[in-house]
Image (tube, helix red, strand yellow):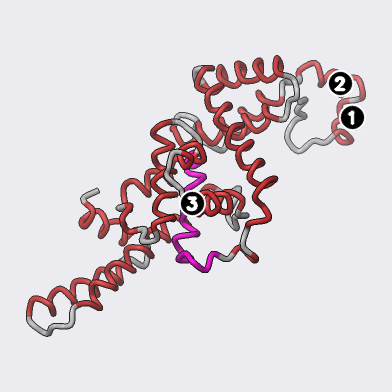
Amino acid sequence: IAVLPPSEDADSFIRKQGAEAFGAAPKNAESAVAFQVRALSARENCETEVGAMRIARAVLETVAASPNAVQRARLIQEAAKALDIPATALQEEYRRMTARQQTRAAFRATDARSAPAGGAYPEHPREEVEFCEHIVHAADFPEMRVAVERYLPIEMIEDPVCRTVVRCALQALVDGVDVQEMLNREEDRTGELQRFAAQILMAPSKTIGAESSRVDAVKDLILFLWRRRLQKERDSLKSDDPVSLARRSQLTYDLKGLRNWADGSAIIRVKFGS
């Protein structure tokens, strides 16, 4: 990729500096990966884990577009040097990324016919299904994993199938394997888990492509699940004795705080000990 000076296009550059200068520009061209790392580093802080992961993920998508194995290997080496990351780490992340893509492609090819009309899952709670649709992508979004592990006890996922998907998605991150590989280890006599997981992995996301949107959506769902739990506890307090009244008052206060992440996360840390 040959880069012209800021605010210049080919026409303006030639008019100002001539065709010969324009013809020399490709001599200073850089590879697509080098250009991408430089451009993304201007927007992301590559010194942080999250910033480096975002840049690496984008670069690996570019690498994957090459049909040539030797070129892919060289581009990974070049990206690793530019990002100051061990090439072996990038190679492993590339392997995991392509494995996830192949798994999802296989699901689309073989299981699309079993997807519910309109994306509906009437037998599972809507919010928990939405949570699953996000959590299966946790390997691509480090902030999502932190939020879930720090603020959500897994037993708050009431639906057993959804809870299994969430548990497997988190364990897959620990084991460094694909979510589907982890799900395959689960006992599934009826096949319900695999059918649900296939539908979840194929589900189009309203927030795909925007990490902040995915993370914010997960945080909103965590707050919802906590509100649901506290609301049930408050509704169960039928007695008017002083202890119940005091507890009901505290729960009402907490429910109001759980409407936004800044206040809600502080409340959760107290209750969850995170």
Q: What residue is drawn where x is 12% and y is 76%?
A: 246
Where is mark 2, residue-wise?
21
- For residue 158: magenta? no
Instruction: Report how far apart the C-alphas of labels 1 and 2 lie in the structure.
Output: 7 Å
Q: Residue furthest bottom?
A: 240
Please tell me whether residue 117 is drawn above or below residue 90 in the rendered image. below
Expressed as whole percent of the image width and height from the top left, the position of residue 258 reads: 32, 66
- Helix, strand or loop under label 3: helix
Instruction: Report how far apart the C-alphas of labels 3 and 1 lie in the structure.
Output: 62 Å
Where is mark 3, residue-wise?
193
Quadrant assignment for the N terminus: top right
Instruction: Report how far apart the C-alphas of labels 3 and 2 lie in the structure.
Output: 62 Å
Q: What residue is drawn where x is 47% and y is 43%?
A: 138
Expressed as whole percent of the image width and height from the top left, the position of residue 66 reads: 73, 25
The number of callouts visible is 3
Q: Amino acid at mark 2?
A: Ala
Expressed as whole percent of the image width and height from the top left, the position of residue 72 reads: 68, 20
- Helix, strand or loop under label 2: helix
Q: Say whether marks 1 and 2 touch (CB < 8 Å).
A: yes
Please tell me whether residue 241 is drawn above or below residue 53 in the rendered image. below
Q: Say whether marks 3 and 1 touch (CB < 8 Å).
A: no
Q: Residues within 10 Å of mark 3 (few under 14, many from 20)?
A: many
Please tell me whether residue 241 is drawn above or below residue 57 in the rendered image. below
Residue nearest the viewer, comparing 273 with 263? 273
- For residue 132: magenta? yes
Residues shaded magenta:
121-141
Q: Residue furthest left?
A: 242
Left or right side of 167 for 26: right
Q: Say whether marks 3 and 2 touch (CB < 8 Å).
A: no
Give the overall secondary structure of the magenta segment: helix
Q: Quadrant of residue 222?
A: bottom left
Left or right side of 118 for 192: left
